Image (tube, helix red, strand yellow):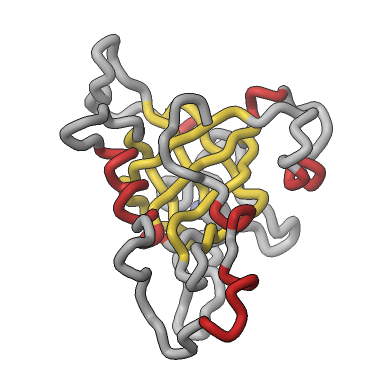
Amino acid sequence: MGNSRINLYPAETATSINRGGSLDLWATNASGNEIDLRDEFHKFLYGSGSETAKGQRGILRRMNVDDDGELVVCPCVSDTTLEPDLDNPCPYCHSERYIWTEEWIVYYCTTIGRGDKKANAVDVFPAGIYADEIKYFYLEHGVEPSKVDKIIEVDRDVDGNIEVPIVRVAKYSIGTIEPMRSDNGRVEFYRIAAVKDQRLAKWDQ
Ligand SMILES: [Zn+2]
């Protein structure tokens, strides 16, 4: 995590289990002297008086669900092959197969090496993927991502400003979502292992 000053692996340092009977069974919030990781992570992403912002703006392509919680299949999907038309990108789902809604997110990301022991999630990804095509994305607790969603990186100029109109330069499929919890079980932030999707629709570019 480079120079990060917040602990991004709270689960590994959790000590509440050792405090046994002193735990307050009805406690709902972090105690007064406990670091609020949600707050720390927010400052890490957006910056604060003492530190520069380390987050990047990108897009979360959230798959829509119907009243039964099922993904909404786009009308462009073939009844026979059950695949979207990849050669003629559909203006609605952009060959995604399902109908989605995009929203801005701010994330911090790092590259996962294939040899990274922590990255057991990498095993679920297909062979033939370069190491720098697998990343961890760290998202704030309020995002509540789903495994079927996609994370999209956008192009920016030399000063770091997002190019307008938006240019989608890479799309990542989610492999695993880890809710990183503090001692009281509250989700402080999410760590997502994701792999670059080789099928960025022509429409997206
Ligand atoms: Zn479609």
Image quarter for residue 45? top left
Residue at the farthest bottom position: 26
Task: For the C terminus, give its image quadrant.
Answer: top left
Q: Residue at x 56, y 76 (%)?
A: 70
Q: Is residue 5 above or below residue 34?
A: above
* Direction from residue 39 to residue 96 in the image, left or right: right
Q: Is residue 1 above or below residue 18?
A: above
Tell which of 198 and 130 is nearer to you: 130
Residue at the farthest left position: 49
> Residue 152: percent from the left, percent from the top?
45, 38
> Residue 143: percent from the left, percent from the top?
39, 58
Q: Residue at x 54, y 60 (%)?
A: 179
> Residue 204: percent from the left, percent from the top?
43, 34
Residue 204 visible, this angle: no
Image quarter for residue 28? bottom left
Residue at the farthest top position: 158
Q: Residue at x 53, y 58 (%)?
A: 180
Tell which of 32 and 149 is nearer to you: 32
Residue 70 visible, this angle: yes
Q: Is residue 191 above or below residue 28?
A: above
> Residue 73: percent from the left, percent from the top?
55, 65
Q: Residue at x 26, y 30 (%)?
A: 51
Image quarter for residue 6? top left
